[in-house]
Image (spheres, rainbow, N blue to C red):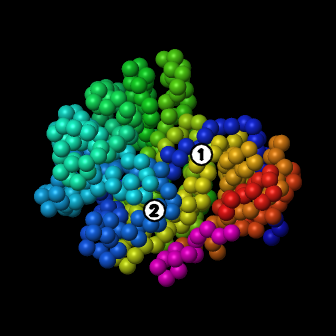
């Protein structure tokens, strides 16, 4: 089959926004085998004396998570921080109200912050909030802030007795999780009611530590389309919200996996939904004359929803194939293109349960999307650029076969991410205004077919490989292989591209 022609035009001086490192955050929860048997496993030969899995720790450090969100998720709802402090042998085991298993609480606040330090991530603690007495009180949450950040006082003394003399300096706090959903303890049926309580809590927390930053619960567009409108209709809330959350899981509770074509089309819907939230934010800020616009945190996202009943299905390696990697890359391209509003994003979760990494007693398996994250993480700190693309359509749909994002890293270096979702190679003309390429190289993630995947016997079927690029000049021509994720490094200087 002959190659198909496409074109990409990049506008070197038209910035969208800085690609904030927080776009490459991660998430971990007290769901079976994420923490216990995941990043933390006491008495494992892979663990150190503190219980941290060192093999897992090392592969997480490779992808440099900028942020780690904890303890949930759903587990936030009804969690009390004092359960996880003090000597481990004195912590009480309790039944997890969400997943019907017993929680030892050996992994608590100090263990979480210690783990963040080990992997180089900033901690984001999510607190429970809701219309039910099983959630923590405002006073309890304020004490949690003191436990983390105060140098002196009762809570600071408790932290010191747990082995942490210095404050933990936790700056990011999430005010609840999916508070619109009946699966949360004491959920809110109206975003305006949630906003009222969230603002009271934020103000109380700021009184004890003015440096704190907050993520408030925004809508899941598949659950409650009125939530954000209700929330932001309160001018006091709209004036004080810094970051609004937005969750995305594809195929959640689906009995059968969607086709590659349908997943690609649905990804277009995801981008449109995000843009609707952005429009609401713009309209709200204009109404209240707010200059600094509210940002978005996609603080949970994944192609797959978790299997919460037949939990063992989350481990099946064939579910994490090349098609899954293409979707993950497509979502990251969306985040980069919308980086003027999308400030933070946390892949959910980092380990097991649909995570980037599979862990069991035999060791670690890196799933296909792990390599996607490793590839895209390189562009953090650069500036997303405007671009135009002309491409064939995927299987006679209205979705383009090529999907792109471009990031200016320095005046002389551009990263071009190109996804070819098609079953054939696509030859593409690349033009960059006022930018003459003298050096180029590339990396690629691909496989024999969409269902290629990594397993314990063949762990590197899907991984990052070098791509022979060798293009130069002003009007570049390059053929992107079928079913691939490519990163082209394009430089105006000869041999200036760092390895």
Q: Nearer the viewer, residue 348 or 464?
A: 464
- Percent across and percent down for residue 375 are 60, 60
Quadrant where the image shows the C terminus: bottom right
Residue 60 is tagged as: 2
- Label 1: which secondary element: loop
Residue 381 is tagged as: 1
Q: Residue 381's image quarter? A: top right
- Crowd around label 1: few <14 · some 14–19 · many ≥20 (10 Å): some
Q: Is residue 122 above or below residue 51?
A: above
Q: Looking at the image, is mark 1 or mark 2 earlier in the sequence?
A: 2
- Percent across and percent down for residue 244 are 44, 35
Asked if the stretch drawn in magenta spans residue 456, the answer is yes
Residue 394 can be seen, yes or no: no
Image point 36% across, 57% down: which residue? 115
Image point 69% across, 59% down: which residue? 498
Residue range (magenta): 454-466
Q: Is residue 43 left or right of residue 27?
A: left
- Percent across and percent down for residue 459 are 52, 77
Majority secondary structure of magenta residues: loop
């Amino acid at each position: 089959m002959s190659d198909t022609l496409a074109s990409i035009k990049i506008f070197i001086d038209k910035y969208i926004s800085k690609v904030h490192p927080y776009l490459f955050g991660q998430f971990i929860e007290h769901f079976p085998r994420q923490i216990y048997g995941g990043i933390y496993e006491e008495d494992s030969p892979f663990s150190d004396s503190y219980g941290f899995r060192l093999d897992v720790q090392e592969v997480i450090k490779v992808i440099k998570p900028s942020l780690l969100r904890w303890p949930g998720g759903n587990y936030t709802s009804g969690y009390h921080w004092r359960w996880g402090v003090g000597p481990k042998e004195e912590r009480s085991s309790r039944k997890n109200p969400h997943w019907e298993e017993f929680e030892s609480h050996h992994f608590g606040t100090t263990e979480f912050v210690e783990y963040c330090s080990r992997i180089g991530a900033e901690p984001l603690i999510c607190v429970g909030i809701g219309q039910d007495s099983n959630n923590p009180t405002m006073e309890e949450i304020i004490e949690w802030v003191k436990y983390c950040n105060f140098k002196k006082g009762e809570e600071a003394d408790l932290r010191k007795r747990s082995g942490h003399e210095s404050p933990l300096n936790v700056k990011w706090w999430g005010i609840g999780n999916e508070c619109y959903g009946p699966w949360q303890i004491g959920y809110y049926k109206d975003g305006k009611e949630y906003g009222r309580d969230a603002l009271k809590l934020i103000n109380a927390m700021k009184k004890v530590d003015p440096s704190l930053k907050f993520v408030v619960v925004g809508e899941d567009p598949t659950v409650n389309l009125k939530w954000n409108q209700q929330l932001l209709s309160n001018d006091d809330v709209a004036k004080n919200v810094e970051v609004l959350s937005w969750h995305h899981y594809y195929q959640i509770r689906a009995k059968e996996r969607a086709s590659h074509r349908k997943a690609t089309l649905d990804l277009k819907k995801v981008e449109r939904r995000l843009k609707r939230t952005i429009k609401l934010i713009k309209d709200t800020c204009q109404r209240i004359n707010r200059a600094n616009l509210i940002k978005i945190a996609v603080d949970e996202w994944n192609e797959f929803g978790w299997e919460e009943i037949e939990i063992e299905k989350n481990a099946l390696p064939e579910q994490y194939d090349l098609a899954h990697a293409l979707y993950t890359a497509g979502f990251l391209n969306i985040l980069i293109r919308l980086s003027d509003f999308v400030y933070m994003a946390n892949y959910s979760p980092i380990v097991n349960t649909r995570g980037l990494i599979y862990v069991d007693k035999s060791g670690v398996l890196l799933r296909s999307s792990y390599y996607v994250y490793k590839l895209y993480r390189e562009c953090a700190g650069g500036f997303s650029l405007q671009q135009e693309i002309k491409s064939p359509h995927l299987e006679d749909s209205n979705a383009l076969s090529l999907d792109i994002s471009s990031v200016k890293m320095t005046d002389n270096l551009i990263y071009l991410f190109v996804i070819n979702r098609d079953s054939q190679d696509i030859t593409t003309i690349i033009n960059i205004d006022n930018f003459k390429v003298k050096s180029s190289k590339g990396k690629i993630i691909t496989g024999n077919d969409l269902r290629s995947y990594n397993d314990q016997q063949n762990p590197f079927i899907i991984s990052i490989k070098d791509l022979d690029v060798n293009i130069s000049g002003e009007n570049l021509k390059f053929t992107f292989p079928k079913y691939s994720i490519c990163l082209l490094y394009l430089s105006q200087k000869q041999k200036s591209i760092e390895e």
